Each structure stands twice: as structure tokens, then as C-alpha cells.
Amino acid sequence: MTFSLPPFTSAPVDICKPKDNWPAYFVGLAERLGKLPKLPNFAEDKGVFVFSDYGGEHKGAGFRTYTYLIVSADKISVFKKESEAIRLKYGLGTTEISFKDLNYGPVRRALPDYLNAVNGCLHGMLLTVGVDVNIHSLFGESKKQGRINLELVRDQVGKGDWSYKRLEKMYRIYGPLVIMLHLLCAEDHKVLWYGDSDTINEDGKGSTFKDAQYHLQVMLAEFSGKNFKLFGFAKSFEEHSYFDDLSSVADLAAGMMQDLLRHQYHNANVEVNEQKALLCKWLGTESQFLQKVNLALVLRNEQVYFDFVDIDAIDK
């Protein structure tokens, strides 16, 4: 990849001052992510892609994980070319590279080359926010208060008859996304958010995909103040494309981080095979162009704490 500017900024970004009515979840995210020692520098890029995936929704999970791959759209052709070559080399066809299918032969064999391509060909950030399952709501001191607060927001925005469970998930997902878009992007950036089909973007159950988009746009205006000239939304395409290989980055990180956090904070025994060991090493190693940030929200003595997660320390 060719850069006319350094791929990262060398100083923390001064995020806008949190408002008095910000949820503590948003304030905590803004304070910690805004003080990172470096951030991807998209100043020379016209477009930014965001890919997201979520883990820990199965029985026995210790953490809900929300993962975002935020990358330069201008420099994506290098990764596209590499991912196509890897698919051809290992006979992947249209098979998705996913955490649940790590033991599938072609995926297992392709994984080292795929992770090397991610490290060497993507410019941006891979962010995972893990939330302890013992934290029932991030929008009130209790689950009941969180429900009251979120339903009030729903009624104020006025788009969709969202259930409390879907509201909680949607605003958990939107929090890191809004903060990172504020930190990394300018208003003239063209932004595309591509996500898997999920309960927050499905049509039905009293709301639509467009309703979900409207809630995000309201959040961007309120908590960022930026008005992006072009902000696109997309769900998984029916036909395979290189976007699926980009989404797989978030899928792998979300799944592996759920296992790592459950081991670190809940003392759970996690089966580690060769593929998972490779993912741990990849997550714990910085690349030249892709910054990796892992943040855990944990419950201690009835209080929620934000911890940056050192993958290398867990691995040892």
C-alpha cells in the first residue's frame, strides 16, 4: 500500500466534551478510546468501510462481544486481490471464513495466509468491545431503569416499535460505532457500514432496517455533531463478494475475544486448538497498518469498569 501521510496519528484525539445527559457507557467509551496513543489516519482517504459482527449470544457465553473493522476504502483493492488468490489456492469457493468453521479443512489451511493478508493489506482499526453477561443493562443502574430510559429514547426518536431487548442490543452496538466514526472520520468521508443480517436490522417485529438507520443518524447528530455527506448501509449480499472476507475479520475477532474474556474474567476452561492459538497470536500482535484494540466492560462490586485487554498477557 502507498501512503503520502503516516498511517497513524501519533497523538490522542481530543474528543468533543461529553454532555451531562450522556449514558455512562458512552462517556466511558469516549474517554478511553479518545486517549489511545495512536489512531488510524484517514486524512488522505475519500471513503471508509465499517464491517461488524457480534459474539457471545449462545448459552454459556461469558461476554457479549461487539466487533468493528474500520478500514480505508481507497486502499482496499490490495486486500481484494489477495483474498481472491487465497480462495483460489485453498479451494474455498464461496465458503465463509468464520469462527464456528475453523476446523473445516479449506478454512483451516487458508487461515495463516488469510490473517497475514489482513495484517498486511488493511489500513484501519479492529475494535472489540466485550460486555460481561452479568451486566444486564448499560443504560441504567438496573435492568428496569435501563428499559425505562431506552423506551423513552425510542419514543422520542419515533421510528419503530422496538422491544427493550432489541433496543439494548442496538444501542450497545451503536455506542462504539458512533465514537469511532467521530474520532476517525471527517464529514466529507463517504462511509459504508456493512453488517450481517441481525435482529437490529431485520424488517418486522415492529421495526424496519430503515428505522434502525434513522436511530443511528440521530445518535451521530447528538453525540458526534458530524453530518456525513454520504452514509450508506448494507446487509449481507446474497451472492459472495470480497466484502464477506472483510466481514470475516470481525467474525473471527468477536468469537475469539468471547473465549478469551470468558477465560480471563470467569476462569472458564477454553479449548485451544492450533487455529485458535493462531487467532490469539494474531489478535495480540500489532500490524504495520491495522491497529487492534480490545476493551472489556466488567462488573466488580456492583460497578462497571472499562479494562483494556492485553491479549499477550492472557496468552501467557
Image: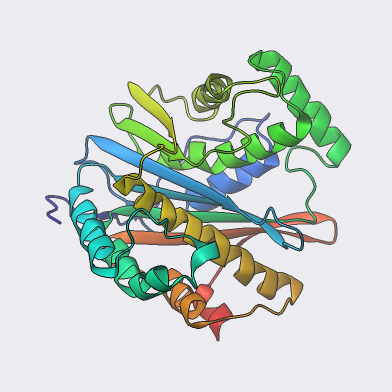
Residue plotted at (42% across, 29% down): 233
Residue plotted at (72% across, 18% down): 161
Please give left or right for residue 29 compared with residue 285 in the image.
right
Between 276 and 9, the residue placed more toward the observer is 276
Between 120 and 7, the residue placed more toward the observer is 120
Within the image, what quadrant is residue 226 found in? top left
Within the image, what quadrant is residue 234 found in? top left
For this orientation, the residue located farthest to the bottom is: 316
Please give left or right for residue 185 compared with residue 65 in the image.
left
Point out residue 51 in the picture as x, y percentages from the top left corner: 42, 45
Point out residue 186 in the picture as x, y percentages from the top left corner: 32, 32
Please give left or right for residue 1 compared with residue 176 in the image.
left
Point out residue 309 in the picture as x, y percentages from the top left corner: 56, 67
Q: Quick one: quadrant of the C terminus?
A: bottom right
Between 225 and 133, the residue placed more toward the observer is 133
In this view, 216 is above or below 273: above
Residue plotted at (65% across, 20% down): 207
Q: Is residue 36 visible?
A: no
Point out residue 120 in the picture as x, y percentages from the top left corner: 25, 65
Within the image, what quadrant is residue 172 found in? top right
In this view, 34 is above or below 22: below
Q: Quick one: quadrant of the N terminus?
A: bottom left
Q: Is residue 103 visible?
A: yes
